[in-house]
Amino acid sequence: MKKNDLLQSEEYFKAGNLSEGYRILFSLYKKYNNDPGVLTRLGLYASAMGLNNAAKIYFQHILNSSCFVQGSSLLNIYNFSPPESFSYSLYKYTRPKKDDELIRLAQTSLLCRGKVLEMGCGSGEICIYAALNGCTAFGIDNNPLAVEAAREKAWQCGLEDALFDLQDFTRLNLPDSSFDTVVLAEVLEHVSQPSLILSEAKRLCRPGGRIIISVPNGYAVPDNEHIRIYNKNILRDQILETTESEPQWVNLSTEKWLLCYVKNSKNTARSEKHNTNDFKTYFLPPHPTSELDRSGKVSIIVPTYNRAEYLPHALDSIFQQTYKNLEVIVVNDGSTDSTEQVLDKYKEKIIYLTKENGGKSSAVNLGLKYATGKYVWIFDDDDAALPRKLEVQIRKFQSDKSLGLIHTAAFCMDKKLSKVLSVWNPLKLPQKEILKTKLLGCFFHGLTVIAKKEYFDQAGPWDERLIRAQDYDMWIRMAKICKIDILPFPTVMYRMHDGLRGEKDNRFSYTEIPKKTLEYERIIFKKLYQRLKLDDIFPEAKQNTNKQIEAYITRAYAMAKRGLYSECIKDVNAAYSLVQGKGLIPLSLQTINLLRLLAKSLTGINPEAAQKTLFFLQMVANCK
């Protein structure tokens, strides 16, 4: 039977009926998830569809199992041309999400509780976010490309309990009252009978559980696939008719979507407790990951100054981490509020240090002297971490022993940590591009960073002159000495509030942050200019004059951006001297854009240097 099913799946695939082909293979994968024939076909199908990361995972699974397929004629699948509809689907599920989409996804995930089912999970973001926040997440979609994309993301995070399956929403093969939360995110506008989907959600949600629903708000999100248009009244009436519950509306920081949830009323379905392992058989098994080694201790340093209001939230989120091999070092930097009293209940769980007020850098330096862990995480006293932050980042360290620092995405929240204002996403850069990109901006969210202690030791102490941008300075130094990677998923909640910042004798308000940051970035970049050679930042410039010209222009712009015009003009002159007698010069689009900004910045500061930058632009223009 298995052989016939495999052949049938091939026929469906070659005929362009991808859904049926995948349905057969996924059904076999649930029963025979180590079978090389099933894995090979899934890998080839994923590769043919352009899901290269998913394909690599399947093929690596075969290699790890020491199983090989002999005599297979499946390579002709590479000649397969996917239907246009599937090419569109691939783009839809793999494209970067827009800022307002990320806000909706993030806010929805934070409403989830317990065991979560998302009907119409798309590429899995809500499930992944909810799992990082401590939920057990399950996703269903009727498009196999969505399921493959979601499974790959769960694997990337090492989340073995974020599971997915390919099913029809109206006929789900799942027991009644199985979930604490059921999510319908951007589903109802796509279906002809929304009441059927809502009824199925009600059946699957336990009595007293939560059903979360989001739809586009009117015509705010145009899409040819939308067959229904909603406003608040239409959605409310439909929810009331099916669930008999009044929706609770969630105020998003974007007006493009409507988001609400209802408490599932008691229904006639029998509520049963399901063994978790048995329940997982309804879903595809996760991609295999290596077992998490919990022997590496994490030293968490929490410098604090007059944040008694927020400090308990920060510490509680640390002690709720699923990775438990940690030490928490709280450094009281001379607080004058009730911080001492707040910390009384934590004294047996923490290493508690006190000192006279000297600023965050001095507090971190003291904490580092007491840190005994393999890894260090410096955590702010006014923010909160998702429960699985340490687990997923330590797992990534273990999957690549050469890594020295890992940073992630972050939720930017309101003062009460109840509303998502934005989602900060890190840039994915090749290692050789990280240090030079640091000239243009920090692009690490410092709160998310975990690094090996050996690299903190090599980089040296935090600069105690810096009241802002201390971490920026440290990450520049780290980028020179260690390999860096990212997890493109949020692991922390950054609290946006208007409280005072800085040390006792240099306090400033939220509105003054940009001004203060620029003030201290001048110190950082003056130090960088003096201590790091151009070749340290741009190694490719050593043997290539054109690359050297671009390097000088990039650093000149970075210096001008911080008001360091003396250093900027030195680099402009150095680049200008290199171009003499060269004729036309090829420059990258990024360098051309920097030249335009640089010319604008230097006009009125140094007209001669401004003219030299315009000369470069003229030389490039003549190339066309």
Image: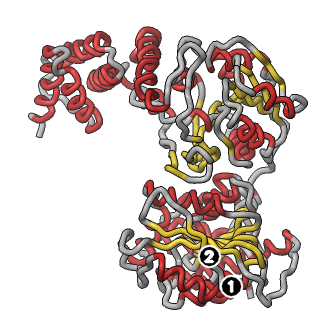
* Horizontal relation, residue 559 to residue 36: left or right: left
Q: Position of residue 141 (x, y in %)?
A: 59, 76
Residue drawn at (64%, 35%), measured in percent from left and top? 382
Report the amino acid beneath label 1: Leu
Whether 197 is drawn above or below 459: the answer is below
> What number is the disc on residue 172?
1
Percent across and percent down for residue 65 are 76, 60
Please name whichever residue, 484 or 200, is drawn nearer the observer in this view of the structure. 200
Real-space Cα separation, disc 2 to disc 1, in angstroms: 9 Å
Residue 119: image tag: 2
Dot 1: element: loop
Give the residue drawn at x 56%, y 68%: 249
SS label for mark 2: strand
Where, by quadrant of the figure, is residue 576 drawn? top left
Residue 548 showing in the rendered view: no
Residue type at mark 2: give it: Met
* Marks 2,1: beta carbons within 8 A: yes
Classed neighbour count for the residue bearing mark 2: other residues with Cα under 10 Å, few (<14), some (14–19), many (≥20): many
Q: Position of residue 36 (x, y in %)?
A: 71, 69
Q: Nearer the viewer, residue 385 or 245?
A: 245
- Residue 446 in percent (x, y) is at 58, 33
Q: Colour scheme of this structure image?
A: secondary structure
Q: Earlier in the sequence, mark 2 or mark 1?
A: 2
Quarter of the image that includes the N terminus:
bottom right
Residue in front for this viewpoint, 324 or 623: 324
* Residue under the image location 87 percent in, 29 percent down: 347
Q: Residues within 10 Å of mark 1 (few under 14, many from 20)?
A: some
Q: Look at the image and tell me in which quarter the C terminus lies.
A: top left
- Do we see residue 106 in this rendering? yes
The answer to whether 333 is drawn above or below residue 184 in the figure is above
